[in-house]
Amino acid sequence: MNFHSAQYAVFLCVVFAAFWAARDWRVLRGVLLLVGSYVFYAGWNELYLLLIVGSTLLDYYVGGALARTSQDRRARRKTLVTTSVVANLGLLAVFKYYGFFRDNVEATLGAHLPELDVLLPVGISFYTFQSLSYTIDIYRGTLQPARGLVEFALYVAFFPQLVAGPIVRASTFLPQLDHRPALGREDLHRGLERIGIGLVKKVAVADVLAVALVDPVFADGSTLGGFAALLGVYAYALQIYCDFSGYSDIAIGSARLFGFEIPENFRRPYLATSIQDFWRRWHISLSTWLRDYLYIPLGGNRGGRWSTLRNLALTMLLGGLWHGAAWNFVLWGGLHGLWLAVGRIWPRVFSRVPLLGPLCAGLVTFHLVCFAWVFFRAGASFDLALDVLARIAGGGDLSLPSLAPGVVVALLLGLATHLLPRSLERRCSDLLVATPSWAVGAALTLLFGALAWAEVGGVPFIYFQF
């Protein structure tokens, strides 16, 4: 079920009521939340519950075995953690990348490999990385295993962040299970506030821009050129941000309703003044995962300039491939890897212009990000990406397309997510906390009702495909 649907609103209310009714019984409330999470996941395909349950059982066993194995038994410890890594990445390889591998082998070698007609399990990239971090952290000696299977299974399958993150570390989530939950007025209101903000971002901004501006520009055979195509690329930058950060907002807000704090995933990324700064602000849980479990193990910046550049390139190429089984995603990651390397010198260039330096750096960064978004949005079609860029470079009709009032509002709301003063955001949030609970609940109910009436809940979030 989609977050922006009436079904999710009903589901959330039922699980919320059951959880808080059982808050005095640690095991029972964990079981209820786990069952609710599995029901949520089964809403897409109940057969794929077997995958997440299988992965959970394996990593729970591996984590426990690692904890019981002394550090001096290095061979056994390496065998255990390797088993977890191979099994989890093997699931990704089969369900996400086999078709990509098969197509490329057939195209280059002419060999015919058997087809594997399977659907991509929703959320597999996220819960695989989350489960992997658990066993790797125990192997490194930085984490103690979960107390029991229910707690670990809940960590892997916790429904607010199961499908599209944020990717939560066990060291962040598991300790929260040790505390008896307490839901105060502020937690309740701020949780509902984040859900409401996420719904607005998704429905009032992302979906409107997708239909009105982005899809026409990236449609096969589109003749839109000049400013229209450029505006479509800018609109996609806002669409993917509001779509994904909107999901994260709903996830964070939903988790807070159950007394859980999960990490922020976005911090106004388009205000970044370098690509490195962008990745400190965009999909933070993934960028830090890649840093801690890929970039640093490769050597990080410890081996000299060329080794650092190689490690950056490999990390971003694999990060691009994580997003999708297509060469455009690899190219997208490669571009960011290249710009991370180049970005090590550009702050010194812009710092020579004290007043315009940050502004120029911000504009350059934003347009480099938008350039890469063209390949990301084009998905498996490299020709489509080149066509969009050619239409922008060629100019053509330089007049701005006529925009409906709703599209203008969507653009302004998208800009507001980055330009609205933080002080004003805090004042509005504090005002909401002081509002009577019945009024906050009624407002959110009306919002869900309006979405159901408008029948917008069938539009999936972009990151569901990853």
Image (spheres, helix red, strand yellow):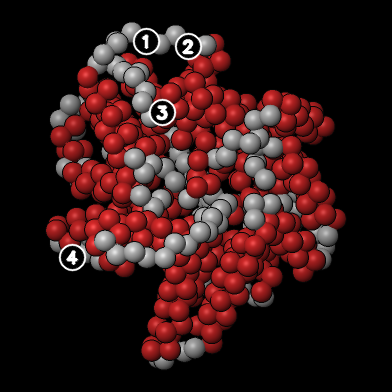
Question: Which quarter of the figure is the N terminus placed in?
Answer: top right
Instruction: Find out whether the residues at labels 4 and 2 contact each other: C-beta distance under 8 Å.
Output: no
* Nearest to the observer: residue 137 or residue 382: 382
Is 279 drawn above or below residue 350 in the view shown?
A: below
The residue positioned 69% from the left and 37% from the top of the image is 5
- Say which amino acid is labelled 1: Leu
Categorize mark 3 by other alpha carbons within 10 Å: few (<14), some (14-19), many (20+).
few
The residue positioned 21% from the left and 64% from the top of the image is 302
Instruction: Find out whether the residues at labels 4 and 1 contact each other: C-beta distance under 8 Å.
Output: no
Note whether residue 416 is visible: no
- Say which amino acid is labelled 4: Gly
Instruction: Find out whether the residues at labels 4 and 3 contact each other: C-beta distance under 8 Å.
Output: no
Q: Which residue is mark 4?
A: 303
Q: Which residue is mark 3?
A: 219
Which tag, 4 or 2, sits closer to the chain's start? 4
- Say which amino acid is labelled 3: Ala
Callout in the foreground (4, 2): 2
The answer to which image quadrant residue 395 occupies is top left
